[in-house]
Amino acid sequence: MENNIRGAIFDMDGLLIDTEKLYLKYWKQAAAEYGYTMLDEHVFAIRSLARKYSIPKLKGIFGNEFPTEDIRKRRTELINEDIEKNGIQVKKGMRELLSFLKENNIRTAVATATNRERTTLYLRKINAENLFDSIICGDMVENGKPQPDIYLTAAECLELPANMCAAFEDSPNGIKSAHAAGCKAIMIPDLTQPDDEIIPLLSAVYPDLEAAKDFFR
C-alpha cells in the first residue's frame, strides 16, 4: 500500500450489505410482471448506475415503451417487503474493517448510488449509520456513477484529496467512478468478477472486506 492513504470510501449495496442479490431478483420479477424478460446481464449492466444513465440504458435494451419508472417502483416495493421480512445481511468483514480503520485514524465515507431515504433506512437497520464520517448518496450529486462526482464529493467531505482515498466497490460502474475521481480503486467482487475492462483500473482485489485490511498495512 502507498502510505499516504488517509481515507476509505465505500459503496453500499453489494459491498457493505448483501442487497445486490435482491436487486437482481426483483428487477427481473418486476419486469416480468410488466411483460418483459429481464436477464441477469441486463441487471448487471445497470448496477451502481445513476438513474439518468440507467433509464436510457434500459430503454436501449427493451425499447422506448419500457416503463422504467413503474418497474423500478415495483422493484423497490418487492425489495422493501423482503427486507422487512428477512432483514439485511452485512457483508463479511464490514465491521472488522471499519474498526481497524478507526483504530488507524483512517477517515471513512459512504458513496452510494442509492438515494438518501433508502441509504438511511438500510444503514439504520444494520446499526451502521454512525460508523462513517460522511455519507454521500446518489441524489446528492449532479452526475452519478460512473462519473467521478460522488467520489470527489466524498473525498472533499473527508477533507482529503481523492488520491489519498481508497475506494471500495463491487461493480464495474462503481470502479469506473472511483478511478475517474483519482481514488485507489479496490474491488471486492460480489455478483461478478473483474473483467478485462476493469482490471487495469484496479489498485487491488480482495475476496472480502476483512482481507482488505492488508491494503492499509
Image (cartoon, rainbow, N blue to C red):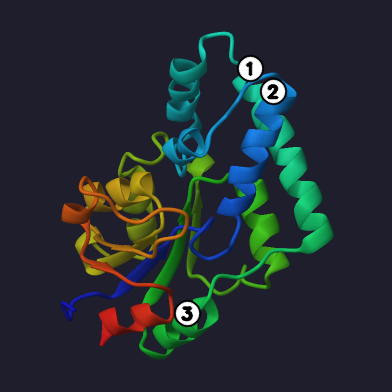
- State the CA–CA distance, disc 1 to disc 3: 40 Å
Tell us which disc is closer to us: 2 or 3: 2
Q: Which residue bears the numbered disc 2? A: 70
The three-letter code of the residue at mark 1 reads: Pro
Residue 173: % across, % down: 36, 44
Where residue 127 appears, x then y in whole percent?
Answer: 68, 73
Near mark 3 (Cα within 10 A), the count class, few <14, some 14-19 or many ≥20, is many
SS under mark 3: helix
Tell me the tag on residue 100.
none
Please provide percent x and percent y for residue 92.
53, 76
Q: CA distance from mark 1 to mark 2?
A: 5 Å
- Labelled disc at residue 98: 3
174 and 6: which one is in front?
174
Residue pictured at 32% horizontal, 39% vertical? 147
Mark 2, Cα crowd under 10 Å, few <14 / some 14-19 / many 20+, is few
Q: In which quarter of the view is residue 105 placed?
A: bottom left
Q: Give left or right: position of 207 versus 68.
A: left
Q: For mark 1, give the secondary structure.
A: loop
Classify the position of the C terminus by image quarter: bottom left
| Depth check, front residue: 3 or 185 | 185
* Mark 2 or mark 3, earlier in chain: 2
Kindly identify the residue that appears in the image at 58 percent across and 44 percent down. 24
Q: Nearer the viewer, mark 1 or mark 3?
A: 1
Circle 2 SS class: helix
Give the percent coordinates (x, y) of residue 179: 24, 52
- Left or right of 170? Residue 63 is right
- Residue type, numbered disc 3: Leu
Q: How many marks on residues?
A: 3
| Residue bearing mark 1 | 67
- The answer to whether the residues at label 1 and label 2 have Cβ atoms under 8 Å apart is yes
